[in-house]
Amino acid sequence: MTAQYDEFSAAVVESMDDAIRALLSDDVLGAFRSNLTATQSISPEEIPNQLPTVSLVLKKYFGRSADIIEKAIAQRLYSRYGLEFQKNENFQLADYVTNARGKIKPKARSPEPPPMNLPMKGDFDRLFLESIREAIEEALGSEKAKVAFRFLEREVPFDKLPHHMPTFYLALKRNFGTSCGKIETAIARKLYQKLSLEFTETTNTDLVSYVELAVVKLNEREQLGFVDLLGKP
C-alpha cells in the first residue's frame, strides 16, 4: 500500500466520521462503527476497501437518510482535495470515492539531489596542505605546531611542498623522530577524508605509500567521469 493510498484512505474514513458526527452525533457515530465491526468484521482501517458493504449497512442503519449521509461524506472528501462535487443519482459512496481518487493528481516527486561533487586531482595539492596543517596542529597544539612548521619550512617552503615531496618526507622524519609514524598516519587520514576516499590504516605504511595510493584512486575517479569541486567535467 503506497503512502498516497494510505493518506487517501484516512481521508475517506475521516470524511465519513465528520459527516455522521455533524448530521447526527458522536454517539450515533460510535454505534455505527460498532455495528460495522460486530456484524461485518470491518475495522476502521478496512472501511475504504469495503465501501459497497458500508453502503448496505448505512441503508440498514439509517434507512432513507443513508443517501443524504453518503453525499455528505463525499462532499467532505471532495472538499479536502479541492475537488468540485457534483451529485450523481446513480452514484453510491464507492462511486464517489473512486471518482475522487481518479481526479487527485499524484504528488510531485521530490527532485533528485544533485550528484555529489567529489575532489579531483586538481584539488589534491590544496587538500594535502590542509591535511598537514590540521594533523600537526591537532597532534601538537597550536603553539607547538607553529614551531614545527618553521622547522619544516627550513627544508621546503610550505606552499611549494607538494612539488618537493621527497624533501618534505625527510623533513618530517628529522623533525618528529619516533613520533613521525603517528603524524604521517594522521595526515593520511585527514587527506583521505578530504578527498572522500576510504581510509584503511595498515602497519608499516608511511605517508609516501598513502599518498601514492590516493593519487591512483583519484586517477580512477577521473576516468569514471565524476565532477570536480568546481563543477568542471
Image (cartoon, rainbow, N blue to C red):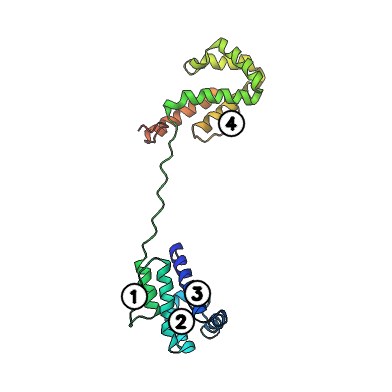
Closer-to-camera residue (152/96): 96
For the residues labelled 4 and 2, say whether their Cβ atoms are less than 8 Å apart.
no
Q: Is residue 120 above or below residue 164?
A: below
- Please tell me whether mark 3 sits on a helix, a strand or a loop: helix
- Marks 2/1: CA distance? 21 Å
Give me the residue at 34% from left, 75% from top.
Answer: 86
Q: Residue tagged by mark 3?
A: 18
Q: Amino acid at mark 3?
A: Asp
Q: Residue tagged by mark 1?
A: 86
From the top left corner, tell me how far across and down residue 206 is, in percent: 57, 24
Q: Residue tagged by mark 4?
A: 202
Q: Amino acid at mark 2?
A: Val
Q: Amino acid at mark 1?
A: Gln
- Please tell me whether mark 4 sits on a helix, a strand or a loop: loop
- Marks 4/2: CA distance? 69 Å
- Marks 2/3: CA distance? 16 Å
Q: Which mark is residue 200?
A: none
- Please tell me whether mark 1 sits on a helix, a strand or a loop: loop
Q: For the C terminus, which image quadrant?
A: top left
Q: For the N terminus, which image quadrant?
A: bottom left
Q: Residue tagged by mark 2?
A: 54
Rate crowding at label 4 as few (under 14), some (14 to 19) or many (20 or more) other CA atoms within 10 Å.
few
